[in-house]
Image (tube, grey):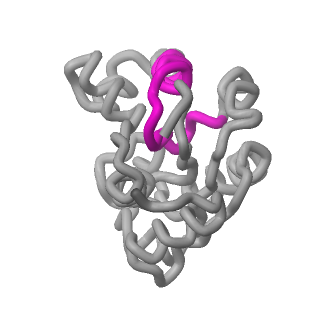
Amino acid sequence: MSGTGPVVVLVGPMGVGKTTVGELIAERLGVLCRDTDADIVAAQGRPIADIFVEDGEEHFRALESAAVRTALAGHPGVLALGGGAILDPDTRRLLAGVPVVFLDMGLREAVKRVGLDTARPLLAVNPRQKWRELMEARRPLYTEVARAVVSTEGRTPEDVADAVMDALELKTV
């Protein structure tokens, strides 16, 4: 793979499997997978939930925007973005022309995957309703930045990875 930017960027809601699918695609392409949430946790030395509680969402979003900008500029593999990364207009602008795939799922699938009772700060109160509200706000933004949309409903991570690679016409090494 050549170039300095990612060969694939995965966006979508929390729990959709961006990192899991990203790692499968990276392995098939012979590149590395990077997760901007993991970058933030490593740089801050604490979980994202703690950053939200201790410093607030605005501070976290600033960290997230910087992490995405850094990764987009220099990561030549597969990149998984945090669920809310697309909220930042600068991030959406930076994703223009980049091979972005929106991994989509509905509420029923989210309940199965995330449980909606885990340590996710944005889902702390009334998780099902909050998830619906987040997706109503974010779905148009995910769609705006995506070159392709791949549903994860009822699919294994391997099936989703196949669908992403097909959508972007990527070949395994």
Relative vertical location of residue 130 with respect to residue 155 in this rendering, above or below: above
Q: Which residue is nearer to you in this view: 21 or 42?
A: 21
Asked whether, in this view, residue 50 is left or right of residue 147, the answer is left
Residue 162 placement (x, y as % from top left): 49, 71
Relative vertical location of residue 122 with respect to residue 93 in this rendering, above or below: below
Q: Residue at x 39, y 16 (%)?
A: 55
Provide the residue span drawn in magenta: 64-86
Count of all numbered marks drawn on residues in the image? 0
Quadrant in the picture for residue 32: top left
Q: Which residue is nearer to you in this view: 163 or 43?
A: 163
On whether residue 170 falls in the magenta region, the answer is: no
On whether residue 70 falls in the magenta region, the answer is: yes
Q: Residue most toward the left?
A: 45
Q: Which residue is nearer to you in this view: 28 or 98?
A: 28
Q: Which residue is nearer to you in this view: 32 or 155?
A: 32
Asked whether, in this view, residue 100 is left or right of residue 123, the answer is right
Q: Residue at x 49, y 17 (%)?
A: 70
Residue 146 placement (x, y as % from top left): 71, 50
Quadrant in the picture for residue 167: bottom right
Residue 59 placement (x, y as % from top left): 48, 15
Tell me the quarter of the image containing the C terminus: bottom left
Q: Can residue 118 be seen at all in this image of the molecule? A: yes
Quadrant in the picture for residue 112: bottom left
Q: Residue at x 37, y 43 (%)?
A: 31
Q: Can residue 106 be seen at all in this image of the molecule? A: no
Relative vertical location of residue 125 with respect to residue 53 in this rendering, above or below: below
Relative vertical location of residue 153 with respect to residue 131 in this rendering, above or below: below
Residue 157 placement (x, y as % from top left): 39, 70
